[in-house]
């Protein structure tokens, strides 16, 4: 396909951007790298032209990039992200919104937007991205791909430009469960937590009710077919409020010095989030951090050894004018794994209208590999 600057920032006309440095389980795979990871000889652009212009040339690959290259993958190129990964729509005020090959005329989802579109369009086989508040799981759902947010901290993040370190994770997407799992073989440690066999699946009607009817039906059907039992999980707006406050406080701590006199370099939506972030004081940030600690403990205790099934996003991919309408419901769903620091795999499901959606499996901390195996089984 022709070079699309809304999808790619750097992509050679022929051949890979970076050849494999070794051979292994990813021989023949090509990776679209989110423009937050260090790639030797390139700059990190973070979806913002002013940041890109001032960024140094990276001397070494990010850990995750180096591991993929050592396992036989080639880097197809560096793909676009929303500015500083601080959004879920996929829209970038400077470079445009990547198209959604699986739902034309609808948004791609973000902030791992460019890599996701590259994989959905067949221009790469793996998308290497990040997930802070849903930035792998949401575009995976919107574009009918497999995606994983691992247990927080199990994949090294050296060489990754952060947004909110308490929630940032390295994640990835693929068109099939096998490829997703083989990337896991390279990036994930051995599981620290085993899942029971069979793993007890649970499904909450209250969480399902956050989703639009066609998503609710598709996710509920997959869960019930897999034997999921009812569970008492209610949406917790206070959890989301604490998540958003701590995320914002950390985002300003990371980027505030640079942005303080450069807010005009941001698009309107991301600028609004950073303006809110700038206004958070120490007392509010400390309160949010304490609330997150309590919520994390509660989420992990409530889940135990079970696997929670819920929608990856509250709707199918919205049209651009509808993009912000479902944000709160989607984040009430995605923040559960983020706050809990838990692994979450998005499994593609088809809705009655034929548009893609995602069923998300959230498992105990450290059960990443077992969760990938389980996801592949229940989707068959």
Image (spheres, rainbow, N blue to C red):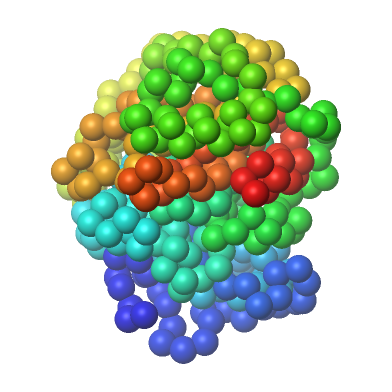
Residue found at x 55% / y 51%? 146
Tell me the quadrant of the picture where the N terminus can be found: bottom left
Indicate the position of residue 333 as horizontal and vertical percent values. Answer: 45, 27
**Between 119 and 15, which is closer to the camera in this rendering?**
119
**Between 314 and 77, which is closer to the camera in this rendering?**
314
- Res 375 quadrant in image: top right
- Res 222 quadrant in image: top right
Residue found at x 50% / y 54%? 145
**Between 119 and 33, which is closer to the camera in this rendering?**
119
Seen in the image, is 119 located left or right of residue 214?
right
Total number of numbered discs in the rendering: 0
> In this rendering, is residue 76 above or below 200?
below
Residue found at x 56% / y 64%? 126
Seen in the image, is 290 located left or right of residue 87?
right
Indicate the position of residue 191 as horizontal and vertical percent values. Answer: 81, 40
Seen in the image, is 184 located left or right of residue 296?
right
**Between 136 and 279, which is closer to the camera in this rendering?**
136
> In this rendering, is residue 48 above or below 70?
above
Whether residue 161 is visible, yes or no, is no
Whether residue 220 is visible, yes or no, is yes
Indicate the position of residue 323 as horizontal and vertical percent values. Answer: 24, 41
> In this rendering, is residue 172 above or below 216?
below
Residue found at x 30% / y 73%? 4
Q: Residue furthest bottom?
A: 14
Indicate the position of residue 226 as horizontal and vertical percent values. Answer: 65, 33
């Amino acid at each position: 396909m022709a070079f699309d600057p809304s999808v790619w920032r750097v992509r050679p006309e022929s051949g890979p951007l970076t050849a494999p440095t070794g051979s292994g389980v990813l021989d023949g795979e090509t990776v679209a790298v989110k423009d937050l990871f260090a790639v030797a000889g390139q700059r990190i652009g973070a979806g913002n032209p002013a940041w890109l212009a001032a960024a140094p040339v990276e001397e070494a690959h990010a850990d995750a990039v180096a591991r993929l290259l050592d396992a036989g993958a080639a880097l197809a190129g560096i793909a676009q992200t929303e500015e500083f990964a601080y959004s879920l729509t996929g829209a970038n005020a400077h470079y445009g919104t990547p198209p959604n090959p699986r739902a034309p005329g609808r948004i791609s989802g973000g902030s791992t937007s460019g890599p996701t579109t590259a994989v959905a369009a067949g221009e790469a086989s793996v998308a290497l991205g990040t997930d802070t508040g849903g930035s792998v799981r949401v575009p995976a759902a919107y574009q009918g791909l497999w995606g994983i947010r691992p247990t927080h901290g199990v994949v090294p993040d050296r060489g990754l430009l952060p947004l909110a370190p308490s929630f940032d994770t390295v994640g990835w997407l693929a068109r099939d469960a096998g490829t997703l799992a083989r990337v896991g073989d390279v990036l994930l440690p051995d599981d620290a937590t085993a899942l029971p066999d069979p793993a007890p699946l649970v499904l909450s009607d209250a969480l399902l009710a956050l989703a639009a009817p066609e998503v609710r039906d598709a996710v509920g059907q997959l869960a019930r077919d897999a034997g999921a039992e009812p569970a008492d999980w209610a949406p917790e707006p206070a959890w989301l409020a604490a998540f958003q406050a701590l995320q914002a406080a950390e985002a300003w701590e990371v980027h505030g010095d640079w942005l303080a006199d450069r807010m005009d370099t941001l698009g309107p939506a991301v600028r609004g989030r950073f303006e809110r972030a700038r206004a958070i004081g120490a007392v509010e940030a400390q309160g949010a951090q304490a609330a997150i600690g309590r919520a994390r403990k509660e989420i992990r205790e409530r889940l135990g050894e079970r696997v929670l099934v819920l929608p990856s996003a509250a709707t199918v991919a919205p049209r651009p004018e509808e993009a912000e309408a479902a944000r709160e419901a989607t984040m009430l769903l995605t923040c559960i794994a983020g706050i809990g620091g838990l692994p979450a795999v998005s499994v593609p499901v088809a809705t009655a209208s034929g548009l893609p959606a995602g069923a998300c499996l959230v498992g105990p901390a450290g059960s990443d590999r077992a969760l990938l195996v389980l996801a592949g089984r229940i989707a068959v």
